[in-house]
Image (cartoon, rainbow, N blue to C red):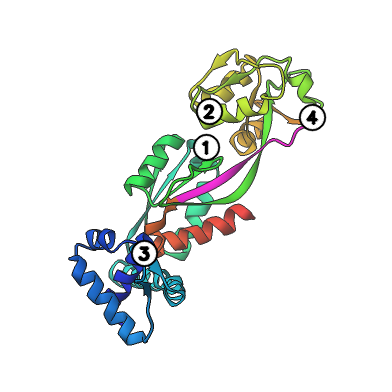
Amino acid sequence: MELRHLRTFETVARTLSVTQAARELHYAQSSVSDQIQALERELGVDLLDRSQRRVRLTPQGVALSQYTGRILKLLEEARWAVSRPDAEVAVGALETVGLHLLPAVLARYRSLYPEARVRVTQGNRGELYKAVRRGDVDVCLTFGAPPAEAGLLAETLAEEPLVVIAPPDHPLAERGRAPLADLVKEPFLATERGCGFREMYDGAFSGAVAKEPVAEVSSIGTLGACVAAGMGCALLPHVAVRAQADRREVAVIEVEDARLRTAVTMTWLDRNSANPNLVGLQTVLRRQLAA
């Protein structure tokens, strides 16, 4: 079987349109039809049901379509491996993820793939998803669920607990745990609207009395410093405040009557899945963050 025939059939099977397939592949429609017929003659079966005006796959066509995508992806992976063994992998991450979770991952990745180059970009969720769509980064790491969008693939790597941080001399600090009803009474600081951390804050208090923050801060670092200075409390992923808590600058308070968690998610372009450097990085991410 010729690869160009398989690629043409895969496009027809995906679009269910000879016209659309010809447009994507920059072929004449007659060329698309000729290639499909050549593949049918070689296999000795009909792949398309031509009894109706719309393109439909025969059972044999459906069976072949389940293999063509995998074959073409494997071919693309082989091409990457041969032609770009030292290619760059670009990673986008939220500031918190980049600071607290990514360094160990990248160190492990470089130890396994010393020829690969790594480029790291930081931004908010919206900026990172746009970078993935444009192809500026190969994969991005965020908190929360990614956008449901054709062409994007996503996977949850781990779950991160959300905790409340308070000044170290706060009355609730010694308890280490408190019900949501007690926490609602406290002044809270939060990030700006549109930020993923603000969504976590609003979601946590959605079932309680409306809880407007006493201050909005764009930087997680500044937010933690304001809490340490005694301005109020904040709700953040535990990984974002662990170092500050270890230095006893803030106290960590668990919410005892609510399961507050957020997902650590990686998102990438489906068409970039064959990049072996990306595949290697994803393998390390799964192992490191699931540990």
Amino acid type, callout 4: Arg
Q: Is residue 38 left or right of residue 183?
A: left
Query: Closer to the camera: disc 3 or disc 4?
Result: 4
Q: Secondary structure at mark 2?
A: helix
Q: Which mark is residue 177?
A: 4
Magenta span: 257-267
Amino acid type, callout 2: Ile
Which is nearer the N-term, disc 3 or disc 4? 3
Q: Are marks 2 and 1 in contact (CB under 8 Å)?
A: yes
Amino acid type, callout 1: Thr
Distance of mark 2 from mark 1, alpha carbons? Answer: 8 Å
Distance of mark 2 from mark 3, alpha carbons? Answer: 34 Å
Foreground residue among 53 and 211: 53
Task: Determine if the magenta segment contains residue 27.
Answer: no
Residue located beneath label 3 in the image: 115
Residue 288 seen in this snapshot: yes
Which is nearer the N-term, disc 2 or disc 3? 3
Q: How far from the left and from the top, in percent, is residue 141?
A: 49, 45
- Image point 50% across, 28% down: which residue? 195
Establish if 175 lies above or below 111.
above
Q: How far from the left and from the top, in percent, is residue 10?
A: 35, 68
Which is nearer the N-term, disc 2 or disc 1? 1
Q: Residue lying furthest right in this view?
A: 175
Establish if 266 lies above or below 220.
below
Amino acid type, callout 3: Glu
Which is nearer the N-term, disc 3 or disc 1? 1
Distance of mark 2 from mark 4, alpha carbons? Answer: 22 Å
Residue 2 seen in this snapshot: no
- Image point 31% across, 80% down: which residue? 39
Residue located beneath label 2 in the image: 220
Q: Which mark is residue 96?
A: 1
Distance of mark 3 from mark 4, alpha carbons? Answer: 47 Å
